Image (spheres, rainbow, N blue to C red):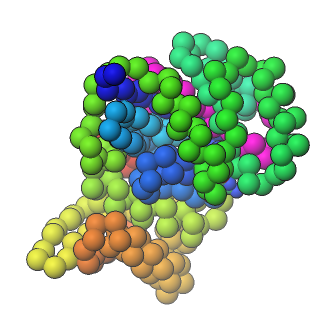
Amino acid sequence: MGFKSGFITLVGRPNAGKSTLINNLVNDKIAIVTNKPQTTRNIIRGVRTDEDSQMVFMDTPGIHKPKHKLGGSMIAKSYNSFNDADLVYYVIDATQKFGPGDQFVLDKLEKVDKPVFLILNKIDRFSSDQLLELLVAWQERFNFAEMIPISALKDLNVEQLLTVTKTYLEDDLKYYADDQVTDQGEDFLLSEIIREKLIFAMEEEIPHSIAVIIERKKQTKDRLIVDALIAVERDSQKGMVIGKGGHVLKKVGMLARRDMEAKFQTKVFLKLYVTVEKDWRNNPKKMEQLSHSDE
Ligand SMILES: Nc1nc2c(ncn2[C@@H]2O[C@H](COP(=O)(O)OP(=O)(O)OP(=O)(O)O)[C@@H](O)[C@H]2O)c(=O)[nH]1
Ligand SMILES: [Mg+2]
């Protein structure tokens, strides 16, 4: 028997748990997770390799009705991921009612000529008889190759998902080295850690206006020095990111630094700056700079 591999894209509506799931699937925190929708902005690849197989998972931005150019470019990336995939996981938050947003995704999936798994996530939040009803309802909506209930967060049934997925892999190359878990560069990882902490610290609308870029990075003998620039869209948002007496920024910096130190196993010296880039989410050039669209 030859080596088997495949590319699997994780698509779905914002907040369904795609990033939580990819982290679980590769046993590492490679994608940021927050309680607010539209967190993920880029395709993030996560690799899981064993003796005879390799699965390359793709985390994607949540599919939503875009209000800015940034949103449009985010969902375009999600749709593009169908082309690279051998298999699609449609991840849903099973605690949410079926609505027009779900139907929109199903209509997209109708045009995709790949097996589609329905992944019913967050089953830790309801009982098994509710689950049966749900499976029956979804079965009537689309011809899924498989329907698998899981909890990405509580790690329920993810092993089963992997077992079933493996039966769909075909003889193919090993695309990534055995020890590679993600394709992301260090700058992107660092900026995402900061963005995660900022999203948690901010109220509803502001998270979507935030971008983070690494301005300078230097590894000395005993520490990693990082200067990061946080961009927001309005002066008022700048004030909120900084907080009274700088307390918000200080807290964000502390939490981000801790995660960076754990991830890169080195002492980190992190400096954060905040700048206003008016309406950057509608400015293609700024967007490219600020949303890491080349990574
Ligand atoms: N109870 C429960 N919560 C979950 C589960 N999986 C994810 N969550 C939570 O759902 C929220 C959204 O998770 P994400 O993984 O960021 O969702 P996403 O689909 O990547 O969202 P976008 O990047 O915005 O598209 C977070 O608060 C997670 O902790 C689960 O299995 N059970
Ligand atoms: Mg995500």
Q: Which residues are magenta?
A: 77-100
Q: Residue at x 45, y 75 (%)?
A: 255
Check the image and report above or below for 259 versus 7.
Answer: below
Q: Residue at x 74, y 54 (%)?
A: 124
Check the image and report above or below for 284 versus 180.
Answer: above
User: For the view shown, which residue lies furthest in the bottom direction?
Assistant: 245
In the foreground, 1 or 289: 1
Q: Quadrant of residue 138?
A: top right
Check the image and report above or below for 237 versus 110.
Answer: below
Q: Residue at x 29, y 60 (%)?
A: 214
Check the image and report above or below for 243 versus 109.
Answer: below
Q: Can the viewer see residue 251?
A: yes
Which part of the image, by quadrant, shows the N terminus? top left
Query: Left of 152 or right of it: where is 270?
Result: left
Q: Can the viewer see residue 71?
A: no
Q: Residue at x 64, y 57 (%)?
A: 154
Q: How many marks?
A: 0
In the foreground, 92 or 5: 5
Which part of the image, by quadrant, shows the C terminus? top left
Instruction: Look at the image and say whether residue 82 sits in the magenta stretch.
Output: yes
